[in-house]
Image (cartoon, coloured by chain):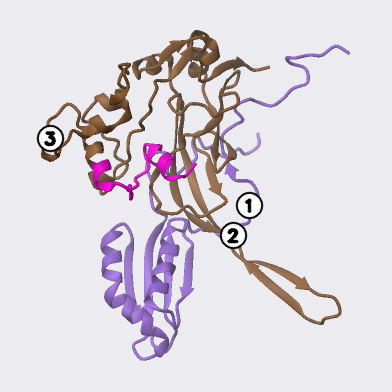
Amino acid sequence: MFSRTTLARALALPIEHSSARSASTTFRACLHQATSTTTTTTSQPEAPLSATPRAQTSIPIQQPRFLTSSNSIPQTRADVPLNKQPVAPTFDAPLKVSQSLLELLPNLTSQKPHFITAHLHDRPYLLTAGDQLRLPFLMPKVKSGDILRFNRASVLGSRDFTLKGGAQYLDERLFECRVRVMGFESEPLRITEKTKRRRRHVQKVTSKHRYTILRVMDVKVKTAEELLEEGAVVVESADSAANVELKA
Amino acid sequence: MPVQGIRSVTAARNGVGAFILQCKRLEFHYCDWAGSSRGMLSYLKHQLPAFAKANPQIEIRVSPRPHKHPVVKGHYVNGREKAICVRNLEPEQIVKKVHLLKEASGEKLKRTKKPVTSLNESVRGIWSPYHGGLKSV
């Protein structure tokens, strides 16, 4: 989940692109300031948007809402410079939803509270809003107060309804799950005593693991109206990104 | 009628809305004479001003403690304190210790087996044998 590309997709994570830095920064500037003419875009020799796969596709893709609104740059921290702000995710195809999903989705969205089975490094965590999550590792390049967005989930549900992705993960455009980094904790010192036969010596092995503490800020299922507004396409039920099931 | 406690309506959950850093104060103690404070003195001179500027929410106190080893103490919102002895440490090592104190929550270290701690009620409710999905033998 935390490879470089997915990190950039995790909308709210401030991370700097080390590879092709200059290109990505100008691209980002164009993304966020699409409608307003800026000095950064005019100084570039080529229009950076033409290099993206989104513009090369022959089918005109309906722009998602977060790209068209120019002024709403998702700012996690005010002290983070603009070129290091989180990148809006770029998808090469619009979200596919079936008619049955659109019909059943209001049942799920209207019934609160929601739970989510979010996956991080392929480990599932069953979360609700307000939970504290202690990750079994020390997360690099974050500091306390940072906001992360989980974009992998297998199950999303309320009391009676479940949104399931099937074999693959749920599409990250279907939900929003944000967590805040609270700090780093460690466990008490563990001492394991190791002995060998016929040797009057006890070896003491110590370990002290460090953990990342997160707090789940919200678990939100997007409504059908929001999905359609963000450019979801209604397709046959076989191609749908997810299916809503009634609790058995 | 038995005495009833006041039932709390909400429980404080830092970070859901606003986020408050749990470390509120850091105290640096050093000795001017002793050699074990050499790294600490260098840290106080060169690294600490930048750290204090970067973290305005933390109160910084520096005071001498003659004839004793240097100590960094962190005071937390929950009233606890953590002290780390930094004798004979290099300034870079002290930077790591200060970072540890800053990011800590102030709670006593506990070994927990479950990754998720929740105050919320179960979303799905408690299973009942008498409701739903009854199977006939």
- Give amino acid for label 3: Thr
Magenta region: which residues?
Answer: A1-25
Circles 2, 1 touching at the beta carbon (< 8 Å):
yes
Please name the residue that numbered disc 2 is placed on. Answer: A187
Please name the residue that numbered disc 1 is placed on. Answer: B112
Residue at position x 43%, y 39% from top?
A6
- The 10 Å Cα crowd at callout 2, few under 14, some 14 to 19, many 20 or more, is some
Disc 3: which chain?
A
**Residue B20 forms part of the magenta stretch:** no
> Where residue B85 appears, x then y in whole percent?
47, 77
Q: Along the horizontal axis of the image, is A164 left or right of A71? A: right
Disc 1: which chain?
B
Residue at position x 38%, y 73% from top?
B92
- The 10 Å Cα crowd at callout 3, few under 14, some 14 to 19, many 20 or more, is few
- Give amino acid for label 1: Thr
- Quadrant of res B7: top right
- Give amino acid for label 2: Glu
Q: Can residue B67 be seen in this view?
A: yes
Please name the residue that numbered disc 3 is placed on. Answer: A38
Local SS, label 1: loop
Colour of chain A in the image: brown
